Amino acid sequence: MDTDRVLTQRLATQRLSSAPVATAADAVRLLGCVQSQERDHAFWSLGMRSRRRTYTGVQREFDRGAFVRTHILRPTWHFVVPADLRWILELTSPRVLAGMGGRHRQLGLDDPKVLSAGLDLLAKALQGKQFHTRRELGQYFADHGSPITAGEQLGHLIMVAELRALVCSGPMHGVHHTYALVDEVITRTPPLERDAALVELVRRFFTGHGPASVRDFTRWSSLTVADTKHALAFLGDSLEQVEVDGIPHWYDPHAVPRRSSAAPAAYLLPTYDEVTLTYPQVPFPSDHPEHRASDPFWATVVAGTRSIGRWKREVGPTSVTVTIDLAPGTSDADARAADGAAGRLADFLERDLEVVRSDDAGGGR
């Protein structure tokens, strides 16, 4: 399979160029887990793939618990649907937690008694569906004389609690994230044996992200190459295997949606979007000399199967300013398509749009 076909198929598989799924939660379920340390950008990821065409609509789903935000797969934020939270954590968290020992020591949380007392106090603060922000939890710990202080210590403790399936996100308080006890907001589901969970996660990944490689999966999941190959062998012919530049890739041939005639010509992909982040081996080729700029808030502009530039946004009370920095030589048609993508973002945010070109902002085009 050639690179262009791979990239085209991924856009359809991830519901960017094919018919959208009904809800934001359906998009999360399709992808298994959606990286979301930049929550508002991640909401846009879900809006691009679903019929939830506004930020408000996606947030409503989130606030009622249709999907949650937590540390899962890796020591970073992801969205996950409630039914998938416990079994994915049980499968993947042991390796993640084992790799955090050095950070425990740096923060003075390597004493099991201190860590256990901190987790108990965190549970006490949240019991009875008392949804607290991290700042409120910091004050609660201080009021109760805990040696765990607000800042990095508390943040690390909360991450451990998430990876252990003790806490996850609650509804937003204004623009702020809150925490909830998993057992109070997520119905228990039957546990999966490890092999069954491994096979299910591998199947879900390649169904929602394929064509993808073993390396793509291990980066995404934190699991081992040996585990991945074991699950692929079990799945057998249910996944199609193709060679891409000499590297085996897999996808579910029964789950590749047809490209929509209404598919956009260009996309402003959010920061940390799954369609750019997940694939270290066959990424979108870039025409832009600064596409790896160090500023993490620049994200990727894609037209067809190429990255043609980068974009950034500034959201105000009634308007959003989108700065677009396109590669030299970008066609007028692709530039107009990028403007159209900015318009879709403004509609999602329910704001008026102002587009700033990189040459107007002192950029490189």
Image: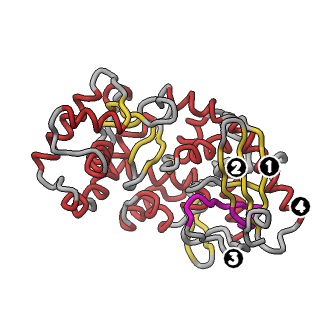
Query: Which residue position is annotated with label 4?
Result: 333
Q: Is residue 96 above or below residue 289?
A: above
Q: What label does residue 16 carry, if any?
A: 2
Considering every residue shown, the one lying at the far top of the view is 128
The segment highlighted magenta reads: 295-310
Most common SS among magenta residues: strand
- What's the amino acid at mark 1? Ala
Q: Is residue 330 above or below residue 73?
A: below
Query: Which residue position is annotated with label 1?
Result: 263
Q: Earlier in the sequence, mark 3 or mark 2?
A: 2
- Where's residue 49, x and y in %? 66, 43
- What's the amino acid at mark 2? Leu
Q: Secondary structure at mark 3?
A: loop
Q: Tell whether label 1 touches label 2 (CB within 8 Å).
A: yes
Query: Which residue position is annotated with label 3?
Result: 289
Considering every residue shown, the one lying at the far right of the view is 332
Q: What residue lies at 37% left-to-right and 47% top-to-bottom?
A: 196
Q: Of discs 3 and 2, which sits in the foreground?
A: 3
